Amino acid sequence: MSTMGGLSQMKLAVNFLTIGLVILSLPCGSYTEIPPKPPGSVTVLPPVKPAGGPQAFPDAENSNLPVFTMDYARIQVPFEVTLWVLLASFAKIGFHVYHKITFWVPESCLLISIGLIVGAIMHSVHEEPPAVLSYNVFFLFMLPPIVLESGYFMPTRPFFENVGTVLWFAVVGTLWNSIGIGMSLYAVCQIEAFEVQDINLQENMLFAAIISAVDPVAVLSVFEDVSVNEQLYIVVFGECLFNDAVTVVLYNMFIFVADMPVVEPVDVFLGVARFFVVGLGGMGFGVIFGFVASFTTRFTSNVREIEPLFIFMYSYLAYLVAELFSISSIMAIVTCALTMKYYVEENVSQRSCTTIRHVVKMLGTISETLIFFFLGVVTITTEHEWNWGYIMFTLLLALVWRGLGVLVLTQIINPFRTIPFNFKDQFILGYGGLRGAISFALVFTLPDSIGRKKLFLTTTICMIMFTVFIQGISIRPLIEFINVRRTNRNLETINVEIHSRLIEHTIAGVEDLCGQWSHYYWKDNSKDDMEEVTSAANNRMSLVVYFLSFQHCI
Amino acid sequence: MSTMGGLSQMKLAVNFLTIGLVILSLPCGSYTEIPPKPPGSVTVLPPVKPAGGPQAFPDAENSNLPVFTMDYARIQVPFEVTLWVLLASFAKIGFHVYHKITFWVPESCLLISIGLIVGAIMHSVHEEPPAVLSYNVFFLFMLPPIVLESGYFMPTRPFFENVGTVLWFAVVGTLWNSIGIGMSLYAVCQIEAFEVQDINLQENMLFAAIISAVDPVAVLSVFEDVSVNEQLYIVVFGECLFNDAVTVVLYNMFIFVADMPVVEPVDVFLGVARFFVVGLGGMGFGVIFGFVASFTTRFTSNVREIEPLFIFMYSYLAYLVAELFSISSIMAIVTCALTMKYYVEENVSQRSCTTIRHVVKMLGTISETLIFFFLGVVTITTEHEWNWGYIMFTLLLALVWRGLGVLVLTQIINPFRTIPFNFKDQFILGYGGLRGAISFALVFTLPDSIGRKKLFLTTTICMIMFTVFIQGISIRPLIEFINVRRTNRNLETINVEIHSRLIEHTIAGVEDLCGQWSHYYWKDNSKDDMEEVTSAANNRMSLVVYFLSFQHCI
């Protein structure tokens, strides 16, 4: 609002850029109520005295009809949101004009850098940071598109082939990291020299949960470029998706716990119970809404123009209802997207299908872009609390626990896998644990009742910067250097594809006769999407295994 | 908020419907700030005492960790908006399941009827009407998609062929109606028996401007079904589009004037000046943003996923900037859409193009659906002021002035037209002047400082009901009965098409040599969109005329 005074003095051309950098003054809630008569609305031409535009209903004072009026406060919110989105989109265009940049430096790094520059400009003109990223705005408007995109575009076939490993890493891995990092950080806090003894165990656990959310968008795009093997790809993809759910659950739980003076043993049990209620409840809602959406699209053949709307509305409704009951809204929207995807795409028209995919992708991309962009801006404009000990130990502990976790968890899961992870895979799994948008948003929207919020914010930003810049940039050369197992897309794909599918169907049939449902059942029931990551090489490798198990079966 | 108490007692299944009918309690501005701790958030399972969910940061009171919480206030706004949209979409599905209904009864009638039923239910459970349709929500969020849709899907070729007539009817016709109805209503107000002497001239003019906005969606769909001649179609289409702009200008002007104690002569001149500033300024902004958008899409070939976003952002920005300067935002967004359409559709990928078209259509449709739906709800739930004299005279005068206007304006424009309107066309033009969403939204969002706002609202609703139900339902039989000139789509289309285009191009070339620019120039420069309304029959009819003028030229 403080910009109103200056606005009339500036030239129009300057306005556009400046307004873009101006405070997005959306206070705590979400959209603010716009005052009906803005304080500084400016009337130009005939009367020089400021008389509110036609929209701002004027006082009884006898002024002439204005030929030209200006009223900024009225359009401020949508205008500035639009400008931020445009700015972020321009950044994306800019990177891709010089394609070489994005080949070596992940897009998230570039976005953060642009954000840093914009932040520096804002800081130099003493503007406040954009307050748009409040708890509600993030959880109700920015997170859903990101998660919907991941859920909707998840390659179903490889996912169900690796569902056990994915959930293992997502759930147990995240718990491992949160608890491990939280406990060790609490131990570190006891060292007097660091002057962080006031951070209690609950707050350390909360913070550990926040920085346990991995967000390997950058890693995934590298994986796609160098066509790394699907097992690795889907595990990183799935881990990222479901570990968001786990992190948010932990986050909500620890935020509650952080304010409790005493944590009784019963609370631990309630926490575990809540964990299951939240996760399975979210899944349940997702499935219900997914089926309702699939069912609805059977009747939309005469209203093709609003068909895509149903997909967005139902997914969003699943998310909101889950939020209402404080169960995992991420699980709900992901499950909803997974459930309805194939039914919906069969029911709707080709154009609607294209629109749905494109819009889901678009909203997700822009949401994520905005968050990285804000990350850069906030890094400069917000107040920091720097504490060498705490920050360095966090970086170290996060690396150590992630590495340990991957080693231990892989040892446990490997015997159950058809294609076990080798040491190189493990290394990339551990090294690919970048932190990103979710961590930042979670820490940024922490309640002010957390005493060391500033320190947590600073540490999280350091953590993100470190992982995104150092690990993100080095992972491509590293993958090529250690020569991680690739997919080999050039072999006799169609032939192999046909045979392996035939065998899979047969196995599913045999299992059905035996009364046994393994993952072949789910693969058999999930339609193949040839565009997706699922490639022939995967089948080629499993072919021998399938054949052996087939023989064994008979 | 009053629903919170009941919510916990009701069953979940009942909730969904009830919440849909509940107050959309968005006060005056737009989105409201959501209180961080809702008054009635309910915690179920372990502790029976209400302790806010994890999101609502609890007091220091020692409560156990809740396994299951509920927090409605937080998600209220997006949740209820989503439900309203879903409800409206369901209504649309419902109509089309029985296609026969929508053949005889326009969709707007059905939507209003459903709205009436929902309103009656809400009234019976003593719910307040949805306050979602505030001035800002309507003008910043609901109107842009509707106008963007019309502008984007305007058939360019017929439009430029009839641009003179369209603007003539839109601008002069709307002024004629507004001034005529306003003056005569003021005269009616002087009759003591009606007890409306307190309505002054300015308020009458304001009201007349509101009910001069025609919205012939229903008529257009009938026109398409019976394939009426293009001249009639495009004039009704264009009139509706540009007369919105004129109406909104008049509305803003009269709202300002309505509060002026004395209207000096200079104000009239300023009003006229403002009229031109507003109209041409809007056009200017539209063209600028349109070209910037076209230019931007030249660089998006690497970021296909966010391409459609630019179209929406730029159109919206054109709209908002126009709103900022209080110039015609409708003109701005329509001109922007017209300017960028062909460039953009050449630049973007096929998928992006489909997405843009689909989303523009979708948003426009749902916005309009919602407004008609709310019209029904508000009719029941709002307070009315009934005044036989004023209402009946408004209906009568609107009909009379519309009829007179069409007759007089057609007589003036006919000599300049290649294909003059005959009497049947004129009748349908006059009879097709349905009132709709814009009128309702304008009157509903009138400031409370207008003394007889309730009477105006009641009269406008009567006017809309009368025109939409009586005229809307009867226009199809009427067109068939009086046998209005149709297009004849079955003649040798391709052959005729090729020849007439050839001749047109030649004429454009000859004119260029003569240094003369007529509408052939614009037709020649505007790319043809074969999907659009432009049909061969149009060319067939003009063929002889073109040929003659061609001979004449040589």
Image (tube, coloured by chain):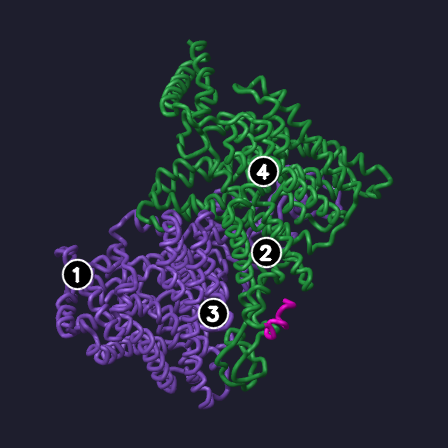
Chain colours: A green, B purple
Residue at numbered disc 3: B322
> Is label 1 on the same chain as label 4?
no
For the residue marked with disc 2, what is the amino acid? Ser
Q: Is residue A422 above or below residue B483?
A: above
As helix, strand or loop, the secondary structure at mark 3 comes to helix
Q: Which mark is residue A347?
A: none
Give the left or right position of residue A225, taking residue A424 as reference: left
For the residue marked with disc 1, what is the amino acid? Ala
Q: Chain of mark 4?
A: A
| Magenta stretch encompasses residue A528 | no
> Is label 4 on the same chain as label 3?
no
Q: Give how far across and how far down residue B251 sits, in percent.
A: 43, 75
Q: Is residue A528 above or below residue B390?
A: above
As measured in the structure, the alpha-carbon distance from the residue carrying label 3 to the one carrying label 1 is: 39 Å
Q: In this view of the protein, which residue sits in the foreground, B202 or B22? A: B202
Q: Is residue A72 above or below residue A493?
A: below
For the residue marked with disc 4, what is the amino acid? Pro
As helix, strand or loop, the secondary structure at mark 1 comes to helix
Q: Residue at x 85, y 37 (%)?
A: A191
Span colored in magenta: A1-10
Residue at numbered disc 4: A216
As helix, strand or loop, the secondary structure at mark 2 comes to loop
Residue mark closest to the camera, 1 vs 4: 4
Picture quarter with the C terminus of chain B: bottom left
As helix, strand or loop, the secondary structure at mark 4 comes to loop
